[in-house]
Amino acid sequence: MKDLTLNRIAGPTEVPETPLPATQNVPRIWVAIHDAACERIVMAAVQAAGMRVLDLTDHAEVQAWRRRAHPAAGVIDFDLPGADRLCENLALGGSGSPGVPVLALLRNSGADELERAFAAGAADFAFQPLTDALIEHRLRFLLRAEEQRGALARSERQLATVKRIGRITYWECDAEGLLVWGDHPERVLGLPVGRLPQNLTQLIELAHAEDRRSLASALLAGEPFALDWRCKGDSGRWHTLHQHAEVVDRSLGQAVLGGTLQDVTEMRSAQGSLARLNTRDPLTGLGNRQHLLGELTHLLAGAKRSAGRLAVIRLDIQNFKRVSHSHGMSAGDEVLRQIAVRLAELGRRGPLHLDAIGSLGGGEFLAVVADLDTPEALEAHLRCLRANCMAPIHLQLLTGPAEVVLGVRLGVAFHPDDGSDPETLISNAGLAVAEARRSNPAGDAFFFRAELNQRARERVTLEADLRLAVELGDLQVNFQPKVAAGSGEVIGAEALVRWHHLAHGDVSPGRFIGLAEESGIITELGTFVLEQACRAACDWQRRWQRPLGVAVNVSVEQLRRCDFPALVERVLAQTGLPPELLELELTEGIMLVGEDSVDLMQRLATLGVKLAIDDFGTGYSSLAYLRRLPINTVKIDQSFVRGMQTAGDDQAVVEAIITLGHTLGMSVVAEGVENAAQAALLARLGCDVLQGYHFGRPMSPARWVRWLDAHLSGGAVEPASAQQRVLTSGVGPLP
Ligand code: C2E
Ligand code: MG
Ligand code: MG
């Protein structure tokens, strides 16, 4: 307790202009006492200094003093005329001054006197006769109570501010379920006071239908809980309320439930936006990988409960990068945005039911379909997804409107067949897409099912075996004859690699060249083929003393991975093959190497070797680009040769390629010639060289030598007889 200073109030003329110097920690006590003896006792009781007596009947002066002197308490003798008003004045405060606790000194202990004192706002009273000990005790009590009251008022003020700013209210509910509300529940619930719920049932009825059950069971369980529920305010707007509740009192034998209710609408919406930012793909607005993992976890839990099948579909949009390259990044982005909108619409409106849809970035999307009876039930979904991705996309470019059509590859993994956790399923669906990419590199749309990791494992084993085969020289280079279309004369052969796997038998180049490219083994493999082919061709020159050329396939990956011109130079030097007898067959993929390809091909051309474009017509070669490359030969892809007699378009393409090739000064080769009619037609159209089963299949080096022996001694290759032999031997014509 602080020491007390008793202030006798100065007279009206002495009211100071400025606040009295702060005698902090020393409370000032105002004393207004009629009786001198009594005054002495009071003075002694508080043992203070520097007091004066004020004629306290002038209330205006009292106010003025109060503002300046900050009294802590007052002692008022109720015998004093005007004591009641003075007490009111002091006790109630006003004009910006807080109330001051007043100790009323009463002459007698009658109830009327007491009534009077309390009515005037006195906080405590003391009857005559007074003792200084009593007064001192009373004053100490008064000041301590005042201190506590001040602290309480402060805390209430703070609480009110917190409640107002935090939009919180309090409620209690007795055993009958009747509610007693704290401050301003109407602000929190967004309802007029008249519609505030009076009991728990009414409170529960305010909740959104989806939240009602959880709110009711939490309230009725009698355990502490915290949950969010939605309540429709009077404006029709839904508020999100955060409800905390617990039993606050059991003293009367019945539990009294109490809790807070906070309007967290804005907070939740901000949290929602933040969460969306973290879980959305900024480009498409669809859920990102993080979001999809969450959705999948949830859907898988459901699928496991119902023992249902679930499909994870990865959609790899092809060629959208080409749109970015040719029309700018924003056009590529726009393409992905439009596809995202389509997929989202499909999921929302049907006809498909997609349980989740999201973006994995880089032109890949992911969809989830739950509750499938059989894997086959997914087929309609896949077809529909494919059709939607491949429908033309309209773009507004700076140069005007444009339309692009994209391809899509779909990879699917099923729960439980291919995995049962989100990461595994997404990754297995990714393996399926990669497999689709490998199996059908040029395909527009391709579906693939991840047959677990079986295939991936097989690939790893195959890759290891291939590496060994290359190291041990277990591969063989076969040769397929190339014939001059006009004279029927053998002009050389194409070298085609063969791999006889001990366990798998013959593995087709279509299967292992891709593997070799991905793993990098293509460099050693390509070197092996080049050396074998050049060495063999050198032998042919020596043996038959005529220029028999050899064509070697070169993968773009090989060009990327090693200094290919240096390799060719070395092999030519080592084998002694005249450079003009070596032709390198490149695919149109060479265009994708970019500007470097011009350089590279120039260096090869400088060596004196010939350059051919293989499988021409299947890729995206542009004429302008071809003109810049030192190409000697164009090989028409066998698909056009095959379709020549049936599809009018294919014959037109073949004619166009022949014309184009000749215009650019190139020799034109047709591959995949399987019958005499094709050979005759190609010769008539002006094609220079023919190659295909009609003349001879790819043959082992030994068989090829025998074949050459027979044909070179006999002159030109007889197509008809050759075909006869192909049909009977099945492997290749033997003389
Ligand atoms: P390519 O260079 O276009 O070779 C022609 C392919 O067509 C060969 O398949 C050949 O056996 C086949 N073929 C030839 N005549 C006919 C015919 O009349 N009818 C049909 N249906 N097919 C015919 P192969 O040997 O399976 O090779 C496939 C592809 O693998 C080659 O296509 C080439 O791109 C690649 N390849 C083969 N050997 C090598 C190599 O040593 N290095 C590289 N990088 N790629 C190679
Ligand atoms: Mg070839
Ligand atoms: Mg080819």
Image (tube, grey):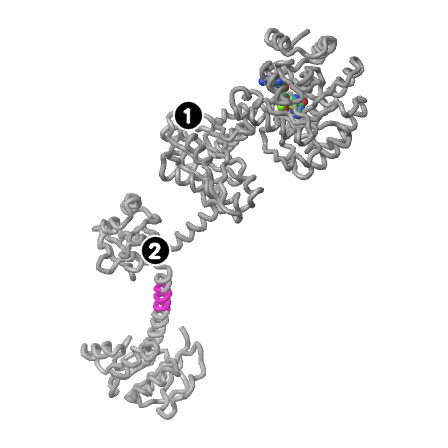
Residue 41 in the image: above or below residue 517: below
34 relative position to 7: left or right: left
Q: Label 1 sits on what residue type?
A: Pro
Which labelled disc corresponds to residue 375?
A: 1
420 relative position to 617: left or right: left
500 relative position to 55: left or right: right
Percent of width and height locating residue 22? 44, 81
Label 2 sits on residue: 262
- Give whichever of 582, 501 is nearer the camera: 582
What residue is rendered at 40% in x and 29% in y?
Answer: 380
What residue is rendered at 49% in x and 24% in y?
Answer: 451
The part of the chain drawn in magenta is 151-160
What residue is rendered at 37% in x and 40% in y?
Answer: 348
Q: Residue furthest front?
A: 684
Q: Residue furthest bottom?
A: 13
What residue is rendered at 32% in x and 55% in y?
Answer: 261
Mark 1 / mark 2, whichever is N-terminal: 2
- Classify 10 Å Cα crowding around label 1: few (below 14), some (14-19), many (20 and above): some
Q: Callout 2: helix, strand or loop?
A: strand
Q: CA distance from mark 1 to mark 2?
A: 48 Å
Percent of width and height locating residue 609? 75, 27
- Quadrant location of the N terminus in the rendered image: bottom left
Q: Quadrant of ligand 2?
A: top right
